[in-house]
Image: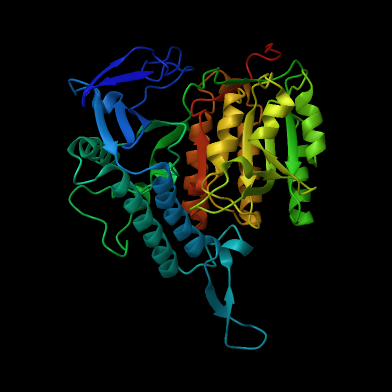
Amino acid sequence: MITTQGTLRHRVVVDNTEGFLRRPGRGRGNRLRDAMIYFEESKGEGFRVIATGRLFNEAPELLLGIIGETVHEIRSRVQYCRQVWKEQVVDGIIPVADQSEGGLVNTHPFRDQWDLSSIVPEGRFHEIMGSLARAGWVLFRTLFLDPSNSDLRKIGERLLQASQQSELVLTFMSDRFFVPWPMIYTHPTPDENLDHRGSNYRLEGFWGYRHLLEHKPERVLGPLVLPVNAAGKVPTGVGYGARIEQALIDAHRHFIDAMPSISCTERLNRDALAEAMRSPSFDDRFLYFFCHGLGEGDNMSPNLGEAGIALTDGKLITSHDLDDWLDGRTLPSEPFVFINACQGGHLATVFYDTLARRFLEKKAIALLGAQVDLPARFATEYAKRFIEEFLKRPSKEIMSSQPLRLGDLVRTLTRRFLDGHRNPLGLAYTLYRGLDCYVEWDNVGKSL
């Protein structure tokens, strides 16, 4: 909790950072954060921004600035960035030669393939990435570089300079201020600005490509270790959505069933999930949903109570359902939740404001989710790589060294898809808590 008096005088009265500002022991705890940025809604003033961590240690007091935007305005800014992604990538059109009838035919390459290395021409790829860089820079500039607010600008300039100098470990904290941090762009060359077309962009300017990032709702505490059961397996619950191509569901089943470290239970409709969560013996450590994210209303007048996911029966599952099913309890297994929202849904900006926060409040250890309705083929390939790497039991030699952290894997996959496949959609995934989370393979059968 942070209390304020006047404009710039602050004192920390409760350390609610779970050790974010302390150095870990044995390499297994939380890593030192370069910055923690706390957004506190202020009636009539927008958001107070409080910055702590290594980047701000030289400040005589905690740095505080004011973002004059309301929740409604912040969502509009975020929605603009996400709209650029939708237009340039998800719905992007590239004409190719029609082999059967001659001439050109319009294609949607990012919908049809996940490997674009030989499909999207290099020039077109750079145009797309330049547009995404501009959108990410505009979002950063809007949030942190308001020329009328010198204190906020100090925070923004320090973040900008630090992001140009090295890789950072960053935590953003708020219940109301939700931003797709991996999509943010800050030009990595100090003596050069991003031009108006983004044509001089560099991949390391995208925050999700270079830095380790997480968004943490307030007052969410708990362990960051994902234990396995007595059999050395990760109990996994999987739910699939309606209107997803059967071949892609079969692909999921194939790579999940092929992993000896997973024991999988499929729950294909709302009633099955409700029955499982109502049980005090619910023991899923990994909850995976390959489905549509739904957000009723629109960006200007969202209906927060009706943002959720839908499985094969099409019935909406919302944060209110979690409250009802758990009936005042938290999730006893403290699972890691992965919501892989695929194209065809209506994923609104408000989606993670509600469902992600409620899962974490119910003691989910972490949540990973996409900021746009992803093409289903890419979502399938991403899930395959993610699950195979994060939930694979390592060798004894690897087990005795540094564990694979959730945040590191998210960044690694982002880089692989961009570097090897000309696909930026890894940047669409945001991690909600759990940057340092890892599977505790070396303590088989640890009780909850």
Q: How many marks?
A: 0
Please tell me which residue is depicted at 45% across the width and 60% down the height of the picture.
Answer: 84
- Where residue 332 sits: x, y (%)? 69, 18
Q: Is residue 198 visible?
A: yes
Q: Where 437 falls versus 13 (above or below)? A: below
The residue positioned farthest toward the front in the image shown: 44
Q: Quadrant of residue 144?
A: top left
Q: Is residue 234 visible?
A: no
Q: Where 404 falls versus 310 (above or below)? A: above
Q: Nearer the viewer, residue 335 or 5?
A: 5
Q: Nearer the viewer, residue 443 or 36?
A: 36
Please tell me which residue is depicted at 26% across the width and 41% down the height of the picture.
Answer: 160
- Where residue 299 sits: x, y (%)? 50, 52
Q: Quadrant of residue 252?
A: top right
- Where residue 198 sits: x, y (%)? 32, 61
Query: The N terminus lies in which quarter of the figure?
Result: top left
Asked whether, in this view, residue 10 is left or right of residue 264, the answer is left
The residue positioned farthest toward the bottom in the image shown: 102
Colour approach in the figure: rainbow
Please tell me which residue is depicted at 54% across the width and 21% down the height of the picture.
Answer: 224
Asked whether, in this view, residue 260 is left or right of residue 346, the answer is right
Q: Where 27 falls versus 34 (above or below)? A: above
Please tell me which residue is depicted at 61% across the width and 36% down the height of the picture.
Answer: 389
- Where residue 31 sits: x, y (%)? 41, 22
